[in-house]
Image: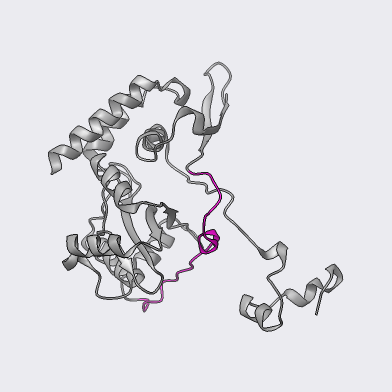
Amino acid sequence: MSLDASDSRCYFGLGFNQYRGLGMERPSFLNFKVDHMTLLVQPEMYNVSYIVFRTIFGCSPEHMLYEKRKEWVAGEGEKSLTFAMQTGHGAESKSELENTMIAVVQPSEPAKMQSHVREMLNQHRAAAHWQHIALRTPDLLSFHRHATELGVNFITPVLRDDSEDVIQVFTGEWFFPGSPPSGMFFEYLQRNPSEELLKKLSDRNRESWFNDKTFLGLYGEKEEEYRRGKVTPFLDFELFEELHALVKDKNLWEITEADIKSAEKKMRAYAAKRV
């Protein structure tokens, strides 16, 4: 069976399994992959975000894909509008790692019951709001150690989801002193971990597994944070203020390699004090 462009109307309403049931592959125009992700931040977070990408995400100046500027008011000089960093590159070694997925969540709790999902939507006066970005790494434990040594806060230990053969960890939210929680955080994950790695993880973290499915455990953890009114930030406010003080009076393109090294030194020193 085959369909040409004139039969494209026949695709609408068919799920992937239905395509399979008809002996058909997903049509090419419905085979989506992630092209890029856009993160909106307040001005106070803009330069600090650059530091985070340079240190925690391991980006170099060569990974800067673009940085665009505009002079909004004549005579006041240019302001940086946006920058983009390449956070990864290369073909996947296994077909199952080539998937692109979007999870959709609604506040299904009764209207009178607290819901952090509803609170985030209402706070942003939004019908929709990107909650977290999931980034895959081939070595999650090494990344987790690296990020922890730079002061990143994680709201969960490294977790195993047996149903998806994945290990994952979730960070605190991106916000700064005086701002409300943003609802935006990062997930880092590794797929198809080895048995040796799983044993190592289990021995180190035996008591820390969520008792329920990983998603429901995460959902419960976020619900508890919002119930307490104490949402964990990606970086402690004290560390954020140190980094912000370092670069707040500079345009993005004026941040030097010496600034990045100074920032990383401050991050490692701060994290070492917490141990």
Q: Residue furthest top?
A: 75
Q: Residue 15, located in which quarter of the rendered image? A: bottom right
Q: Is residue 207 left or right of residue 114?
A: left
Closer-to-camera residue (111/58): 58
**Can residue 241 be seen at all in this image of the molecule?**
yes
Q: Is residue 33 left or right of residue 220?
A: right
Residue ID at (53%, 35%): 82
Residue 250, percent across and down?
A: 40, 22
Residue 55, percent across and down?
A: 35, 35
**Can residue 183 be seen at all in this image of the molecule?**
no
Q: Residue furthest front?
A: 196
Q: Main secondary structure of the magenta part?
A: loop
Rendered view: 247 above or below 171: above
Residue 268, percent across and down?
A: 22, 34
Rendered view: 85 above or below 139: above
102 magenta-colored: yes
